[in-house]
Amino acid sequence: MIAQLVTLALAIVTVIPLDLPDYAAVTPDFLLIAVYHWSLYRPNDLPYSVVFAIALLEDLLTAGPPGLIELTLLLVRWTVLNTRRLFIGRSFPFVWGGFAVTTMIVALADWLLASILAGAMQDPRSVAFRTVLTVAVYPIMTPLFARLQKLNPA
């Protein structure tokens, strides 16, 4: 339940409108961080249905391309579940590297789709910045999630 509440809270934090120029470009993808982490360490605490529902909420709040966030996060969850045996028990840099690769693939796919939908190549700088920021924030979020996991032992 903690994983679900934290993931929902992070989805809301991601879309809270602040009076900052290009806020979306300078906000880490907290929802991706949460789905990756919980899928790796507590997969039963964040089932597909919850990932879908939270992603749908973020999708509705951001008015992005319909279904993109849901599809992306469900694919991330599926991929993490199918590769988690490679990561469990490994060092943090190895897990972080897996997250970095995942984040880059998601960012590239989002950028390509945005370019296709716009009918023109989109500026990759904001996507690249958000990707780097998301990867950089992951090590900060992981200890917080670990502490929360202790509140709700498996």
Image (cartoon, grey):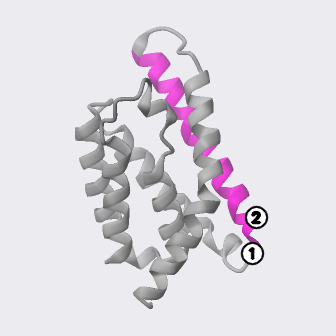
| Residue placed furthest toward the bottom | 153
Residues marked 2 and 1 touching at CB (< 8 Å): yes
Q: Is residue 20 magenta?
A: no
- The Cα–Cα distance between marks 2 and 1, rounded to whole angstroms, is 6 Å
> Which residue is denoted by mark 1 in the rendering?
90
**Residue 10 placement: quadrant:** bottom left
- Residue 62 in the image: above or below residue 12: above
- For residue 102, say whether it is visible: no
Please provide percent x and percent y for residue 15: 33, 41
Tell me which segment is drawn in magenta. 90-117
Provide the secondary structure element on which disc 2 rests. Answer: helix
* Residue 131 image offset from top left, x and y in percent: 60, 39
The residue lying at 35 percent from left, 64 percent from top is 48
Q: Position of residue 84 (x, y in %)?
A: 61, 71
Where is residue 19? Give x, y as percent. 34, 29
Give the residue pinned by disc 2.
94
Relative placement, left or right, of 145 versus 68 is right
Q: Secondary structure at mark 1?
A: loop
Decide which of 139, 56 is in the foreground and name it. 139
Residue type beneath disc 2: Phe
